[in-house]
Image: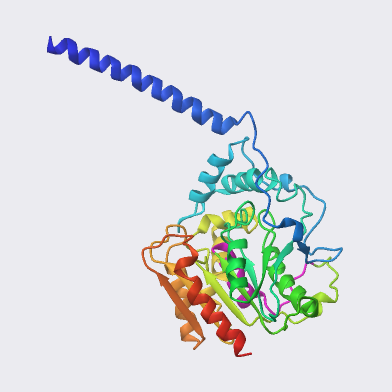
Amino acid sequence: MMMRIVKKIAKMAGILLVILTLFMGIGYAILVINPLGNKPGKPVADIEDKVEIWGEEVAGNHSGSKLDDMNIKGNPNRLLATFKFSTGIVGEDYKDNEAAIDTFTYVYEIEGGYEKSTYEDKPYLIPYTVANSDSAVIIMPGGGYGFKEMDGGTAEGKEVAASLNKAGINAFVLHYRSNPYEWPIPQLDVQRAVRFLRYHANDYGLHPDRIGLIGFSAGGYQTGSFINLIQGEKLFPASYQPDAIDAVDDQVASAAMIYPALTYRYNVPMLFASFNDEDVRNPEKREELLQQTDLSTHFRTAHIPQFIAYGTKDLAIGVKGPQEYIQSARNADADVTVLVAEDQNHGFKQEYYMRAYLEWVKKIFASL
């Protein structure tokens, strides 16, 4: 009798397992094949107010197709592409994740309607201004150089601008170019944004020496790489003709980096989002790229006050990158303020850093 009951239970369990496997297989197939395609993404907040920062010529742009340079696999669901991207850019070990990164960028940025399928995107600022303020902060959202959080999100853009505005500070959210644009194009967009605001300081009622930066995650790398590797340099493509804005000083008053990626050493696969894929695949050239872009070994900004906040349980970039950079800053006797968000993972909320940051940046501006 007991054996008969056990056999029935085993048979039912087998049937349930087959059904579950079938459903999982169908679900995965839908995610991979994605027969209905992906809908356009949510609009960028306040996109109607955008101000393009380049002139008729955008350094690094041309009419070629991005798709010719991207390794796009199938037509995956955005959810699956996001999962593969977010997990695929993490870690110290080399992995050839070009396809996962390019596919995600295509699905999210190009199909989402945030960027073109050709190299003709026009970087822009979204202004959030307040009356009777001559100070400003440029905000750079993160996104692992595969997308920008402001594309459909507000946590690293509009919401940060709102907090700055409440503190009496003008804010400008920067939509910079990313994958498949390669280094130093994203950083040139930061340089141009700084020069654009300094050039148009009177139009916005700003003091040109009271402009700061704040970046999140990859936007933190945008901030750190600009001040340490790009600022004061002329890295335009040979075919680009500089204009009057490019002649403006590109100095900034302050630089803040929140849960920042300040090196690629702990996100080695993310190199595919910023550099030529063949160079990344070559072990010797890959090591050169890792060395050249490690900001802790190229710290040269002791003259710029810096604010760095990182979480002790950051599973995306870890803690070594920020800690190494902080040590380099302290070795250079730099003015660096550090906030450690205990037990916080990547992307922690404003409540963990904003009050301290606002107090810090207001003091910087008041001293100028």
Residue 280 painted magenta: no
- Hey, which quadrant is residue 135 in on the image? bottom right
Q: In the displayed structure, would residue 85 be above or below residue 212?
A: above
Q: Position of residue 35 (x, y in %)?
A: 63, 28
> Where, quadrant-wise, is the C terminus in this rendering?
bottom right
Our reading of the magenta stretch's main secondary structure is helix
Q: Nearer the viewer, residue 238 or 325?
A: 325
Whether residue 22 is visible to the viewer of this picture, yes or no, is: yes
Q: Position of residue 14 (x, y in %)?
A: 31, 18
Residue at the (64%, 41%) spot, across then down? 72
Q: Position of residue 179 (x, y in %)?
A: 66, 54
Identify the residue at the far left of this view.
1
Residue 346 vs residue 231: left or right? left
**Over which residues does the magenta segment extend?**
217-237
Residue 235 painted magenta: yes
Q: In the displayed structure, would residue 118 be above or below residue 156?
A: above
Whether residue 282 is visible to the viewer of this picture, yes or no, is: no
- Hey, which quadrant is residue 154 in on the image? bottom right
Q: In the displayed structure, would residue 275 be above or below residue 293?
A: above
Q: Nearer the viewer, residue 184 or 223?
A: 223
Q: In the displayed structure, would residue 191 be above or below residue 300?
A: above
Q: Position of residue 171 (x, y in %)?
A: 66, 70
Residue 339 vs residue 288: left or right? left
Residue at the (59%, 72%) spot, across then down? 166
> Where, quadrant-wise, is the N terminus in this rendering?
top left
